[in-house]
Image (cartoon, rainbow, N blue to C red):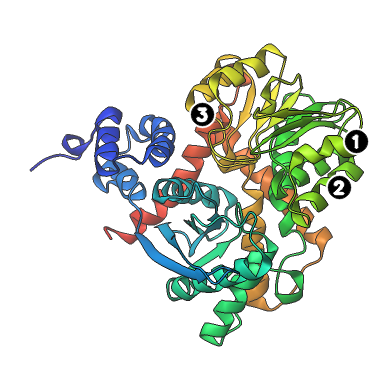
Amino acid sequence: MASVYDRQVDFDTFMEGVEKRNPGQDEFVQAVREVAADVFPFIEDKPEYHEAQILRRIAEPDRIVSFRVCWEDDDNNVRVERGWRVQNNNAIGPYKGGIRFHPTVNESVLKFLAFEQTFKNSLTGLPMGGGKGGSNFNPRGKSDNEVMRFCQSFMTELYRHIGPHTDVPAGDIGVGSREIGYLFGQYKRLTGRWEGVLTGKGCEYGGSAMRPEATGYGAVYFLRNMLTRSEHDVEGKTAVISGAGNVATHAAKKINALGGKVLTLSDSDGFVHDPDGIDQDKIAWVRELKNERRGRISEYVEEFTGATYHEGKRPWHVECDVAMPCATQNELEADEARALVDNGVMAVCEGANMPTTKNGVDVFHEADVLYAPGKAANAGGVAVSGLEMSQNAERVSWNREKLDDMLLDLMSDIHDKCVDRGAGSRGRVNYVKGANIAGFERVAGAMLAFGVM
C-alpha cells in the first residue's frame, strides 16, 4: 500500500497538472502558482494535507455555471453576452464574491478571482467561502435602461444558483449601486422573497452604511498597520494611486484624512498627476465625474490647473512614498516596480486583486519594500459585506461609526495574521507568504473536518 509521502508531489509537478487542466487560463494559473509557492513549503511536513489533496481540491472550483444573457438595446437590437458564476470553495461559509461587468471578463479571470477570494474571505475570520461572477457586458456608454435590461436578464439566469445560505454576490468592476439595485430588484421579482442575497445594496433596502468606503478605507488601514510596525506613519507621506473608481477614490480620501498627500488617479485611458495634491474637494469632483457623468479622468486637467494628463500611461514612474494599485489585475509590472523602488517608495499596498505581476512582486521583495497583497490589504470590502449579511439576517442596521470601528479591528487582525505567518529574519515580514498560509490554514482545516467530498 502506498504511503502518504508516496502520494506527495512537488511544486513543479503540481503546477504542471494545474496548467494541463486549465489550458490558456493564464490568470488562473498565475494565481494558483503564487499561492502554491508559499503553501508547498508550509505543508511539506504535514502529511494530512497531502493525503487529502487539499491544495489540489481548492484549485479545482466546486462548480462553474456558464449561461447566455440576451437583452435588447435602445435601438431594439437583440444583443447576446455570456455570463458566469464560479463557486470555488464553501468550506467555511456560503460562496461570497463580486460580480464584474467588463469586456475583459472570461472564465480564467473569474476563476483566478474566485480562487483569490477563497483565501481573502478566510483571512477576515468571517464565515464566507470564495466565489466570483460576471459577464463580458460593458456598461460603459450604455443608457440606464439598457443596463437595467441587461441586469434583469443576467439575474434571470443567475438567481437559481444563489441565495443567502448558498452564494451571496456583491459588486465589482462595472457593477456599482445602480447595477446592484437592478439585480436585487429582479431577484426579488423572480423569487417573491426579500433576503440578503446581494451585498453592496443601498441603505434604503438593507445595505451597509460603510460598504462603499470599505475596500479603500480598509486598504489604507492595512497600510497604516504596516507603516506603524516599521515606525512610520501615513501622515506626511505622498501617495500614488491608480484607478478612479470606488476603491481608488475612497483610498485617496482616507490617505488625505490621515495627513497624506495623493498625487495621482487614473483610468484605462491614462492618469493625472497633480503635484498640489488631490484633496477631498477634488476627489468629490472625480467621483461626480465618474459616477454621474460617466466621464474620463482626462477631464480633470480642464478643471484643475497645475495638473498634467498622461495618455496611455500608468502612474508608477511618479516619485512617491507609498503606492496603491487600485485598478485591475497585472497593472504593475517589473519595470514599473523598479521605477518605484528607484524613486524611493517604502510601501506598496494593493487595493485591486493581483494588480502586481509576479516579477513586480519579486522586485519589491528584493528591495525590502513593504508589500501588501490584495487578498489581505483589500479584504475590508468583503469583510463589511459579511457584516451586511449579518445585518440582513438579523433585520438590523448598524451605524457608520460602529462599522468603521469593526473595519479597523478586522484589518488589524488580518495584518497580525500576516505578520504571524510571514515573519522572517531581522524582523522582516513577507506579507504575501503570511496571507497565503493564514488563509490556507483555515480553509484546509474545515476541509479536513468534512472528509473527502
Q: Which mark is residue 90?
A: none
Q: Are marks 2 and 1 in contact (CB under 8 Å)?
A: yes
Q: CA distance from mark 1 to mark 3?
A: 33 Å
Q: Is residue 2 left or right of residue 139?
A: left
- Closer-to-camera residue (177/89): 177
Of residue 389 and residue 112, the one placed in the foreground of this image is 112
In the rendered structure, find residue 304 and report the number of the disc placed on it: 1
Gap in angstroms between the C-alphas marked 2 and 1 = 10 Å
Q: Mark 3 — residue? A: 357
Q: Residue 321: which quarter of the image? A: top right
Amino acid type at circle 3 is Thr
Residue count near mark 2 (Cα–Cα under 10 Å), binned few <14, some 14–19, many ≥20: some
Of the 4 image quadrants, the one containing the N terminus is: top left
Ranked by sequence position, the earlier of labels 3 and 2 is 2
Residue 153 place in picture, x, y as percent: 50, 72
For image coordinates 27% across by 49% down, the residue present is 52
Which residue is identified by label 2?
A: 285
Which residue type does callout 2 highlight? Trp
Relative image position of residue 97 (x, y in whole percent):
53, 57
Q: Left or right: where does residue 53 sit relative to residue 256?
A: left
Residue at coordinates 57% horizontally, 72% vertically from top-left?
149
Residue sitting at the far top: 342
Element at label 1: loop
